Image (cartoon, rainbow, N blue to C red):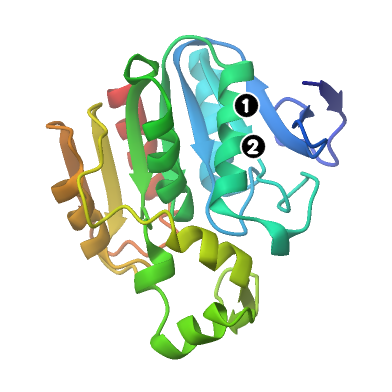
């Protein structure tokens, strides 16, 4: 496995981007900050990357407090190699695990935003229990391949078509590729107990129109852990990127770490 530093185009106060080479030679962009344990690993949402506001805020907070932190771009996203149309939860899961094994020591707190919250759960199940200090989900969206599409859209995806939807997040229209959808449908979690026993904290905006708060409530029911808390944020939307939201996120991550 190879990691090399490259200069980044603008100064975010973070370390330079590095690249980790997977066995099939695809290069995964990441930023790693050495520091105290447990370290923070942030998993961005669908079509997002490590330049997002929540990711950079956590990285800066870790830098200021001397805590280890790992950010990454999934293949096909951000600075990583690949075509987004080829991206799947399976591939991104492999990439996250590879970087965790290569660049973290001791325990970690996994923080997942939206689709990253689904990936967070899948990754946590693949790690040793003693590796996990806790999970923090932000508008977690497990199983959105099921509840996030109507029957006509599912029929199109099932037949191999790409579907497009309007988006408020700068990706207009937002594509969902059949390869991603088929892979995701095989990794649904909400219909049975999720064998995760570490502390879990879930944040969800009450005004989230993309991921219903009921999804986080459902997660509290199916997680095996006895230490699961959900915080519903009045006036919060799907982004949860207001200054008050970021302050809350840092406080919750700090309390679980």
Mark earlier in primary sequence (2, 1): 2
Q: Residue 166: in sight, yes or no?
A: no
Place of residue 164 in the rendered image (x, y in percent of width and height, measured from the top left): 61, 82
Residue 72, numbered label: 2
- Say which of 15 and 40 sits in front: 40
- Say which of 251 and 144 sits in front: 144
Place of residue 248 in the rendered image (x, y in percent of width and height, measured from the top left): 33, 41
Q: Quadrant of residue 159?
A: bottom right
Residue at point 29%, 55% (across, down): 204
* Left or right: residue 29 compared with residue 178: right
- Regarding mark 1 in the picture, which secondary structure is present there? helix
* Left or right: residue 220 compared with residue 46: left
Mark 1 packing: few (<14 Cα in 10 Å), some, or many (20+)?
many
Is 28 above or below relative to 213? above
Task: Give the total number of marks visible in the rendering.
Answer: 2
Mark 2 packing: few (<14 Cα in 10 Å), some, or many (20+)?
many
- Regarding mark 2 in the picture, which secondary structure is present there? strand
Quadrant in the picture for the N terminus: top right
Q: Residue 49: in sight, yes or no?
A: yes
* Left or right: residue 113 compared with residue 194: right
Residue at point 64%, 48% (across, down): 49
Q: Quadrant of residue 169?
A: bottom right
Instruction: Check if mark 2's residue and mark 1's residue have beta carbons within 8 Å.
Output: yes
Is 65 above or below relative to 25? above
Q: Quadrant of residue 165?
A: bottom right
Residue 99, numbered label: 1
């Amino acid at each position: 496995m190879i990691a090399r530093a490259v200069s980044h185009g603008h100064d975010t106060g973070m370390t330079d981007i590095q690249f980790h080479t997977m066995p099939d030679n695809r290069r995964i962009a990441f930023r790693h900050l050495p520091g105290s344990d447990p370290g923070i690993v942030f998993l961005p949402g669908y079509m997002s990357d490590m330049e997002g506001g929540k990711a950079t805020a956590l990285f800066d907070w870790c830098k200021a407090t001397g805590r280890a932190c790992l950010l990454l771009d999934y293949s096909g996203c951000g600075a990583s190699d690949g075509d987004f149309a080829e991206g799947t939860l399976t591939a991104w899961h492999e990439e996250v695990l590879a970087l965790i094994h290569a660049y973290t020591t001791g325990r970690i707190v996994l923080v997942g935003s939206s689709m990253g919250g689904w990936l967070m759960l899948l990754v946590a199940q693949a790690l040793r229990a003693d590796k996990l200090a806790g999970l923090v989900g932000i508008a977690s969206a497990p199983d959105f391949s099921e509840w996030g599409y109507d029957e006509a859209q599912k029929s199109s995806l099932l037949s191999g078509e790409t579907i497009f939807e309007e988006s408020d997040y700068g990706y207009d229209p937002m594509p969902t590729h059949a390869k991603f959808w088929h892979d995701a449908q095989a990794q649904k979690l909400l219909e049975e107990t999720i064998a995760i026993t570490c502390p879990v904290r879930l944040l969800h905006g009450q005004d989230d129109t993309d991921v219903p708060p009921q999804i986080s409530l459902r997660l509290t029911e199916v997680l095996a852990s006895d230490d699961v808390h959900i915080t519903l944020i009045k006036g919060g939307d799907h982004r949860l990127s207001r200054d008050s939201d970021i302050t809350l996120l840092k406080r919750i991550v700090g309390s679980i770490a």
